[in-house]
Image (cartoon, rainbow, N blue to C red):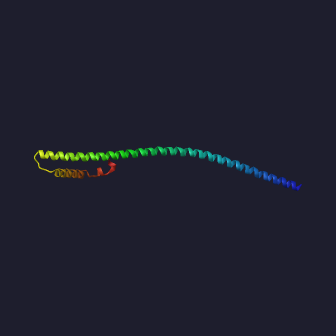
């Protein structure tokens, strides 16, 4: 009889152990399910962030295109200004010749260069050199 009782006691102990293990397995499955839900939520956020990044990259590319267009326009403006300056120098030289002043085109350009240098010096003060004031 003692053997049967020992066996019964061992069976009950093993049964309790198996029940405990089954509870732990169910708890682990619950944790896995919660983790999978969290992973799905995180994946949705990652996809959303990636779409925002793509939109931002599109904006950056468009801005770079506009910067290049602006730089081209600046170069064109500089060329136009140079042509205008040379034309004005020639016109000024012709006006001086018509008024009887004998002056070479180089002399006229030198006078214009001097005027430009003087203007630059007059404009060199803190308000124009400080980007915060622009």
User: Could you tell me residue 95's position as x and y percent?
Assistant: 14, 45
Q: Is residue 52 left or right of residue 25?
A: left
Residue in view at x 67 percent, y 46 percent: 30
Name the foreground residue: 88 vs 118. Answer: 88
Residue in view at x 86 percent, y 54 percent: 5
Q: How many marks?
A: 0
User: Could you tell me residue 2's position as x and y percent?
Assistant: 88, 56
Instruction: Tell which residue pokes out farthest to the right in this image.
Output: 1
Name the foreground residue: 45 vs 9. Answer: 45
User: Could you tell me residue 83's position as x and y percent?
Assistant: 24, 46
Residue in view at x 68 percent, y 47 percent: 29
Name the foreground residue: 31 vs 86. Answer: 86
Instruction: Tell which residue pokes out farthest to the left in this image.
Output: 100
Q: Is residue 43 left or right of residue 111?
A: right
Name the foreground residue: 83 vs 46. Answer: 83
Indicate the quadrant containing the N terminus: top left, top right, bottom left or bottom right. Answer: bottom right
Residue in view at x 31 percent, y 47 percent: 75
User: Could you tell me residue 71's position as x and y percent?
Assistant: 34, 47
């Amino acid at each position: 009889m003692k053997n049967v009782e020992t066996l019964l006691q061992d069976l009950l102990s093993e049964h309790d152990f198996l029940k405990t293990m089954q509870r732990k397995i169910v708890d682990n499955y619950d944790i896995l399910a919660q983790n999978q839900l969290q992973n799905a939520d995180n994946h949705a956020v990652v996809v959303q962030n990636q779409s925002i990044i793509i939109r931002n990259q599109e904006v950056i590319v468009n801005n770079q295109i506009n910067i290049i267009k602006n730089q081209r326009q600046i170069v064109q403006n500089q060329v136009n200004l140079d042509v205008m300056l040379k034309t004005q120098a020639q016109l000024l030289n012709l006006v001086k010749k018509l008024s009887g002043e004998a002056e070479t085109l180089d002399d006229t350009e030198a006078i214009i260069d001097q005027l430009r240098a003087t203007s630059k010096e007059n404009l060199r003060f803190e308000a124009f050199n400080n980007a915060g004031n622009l």
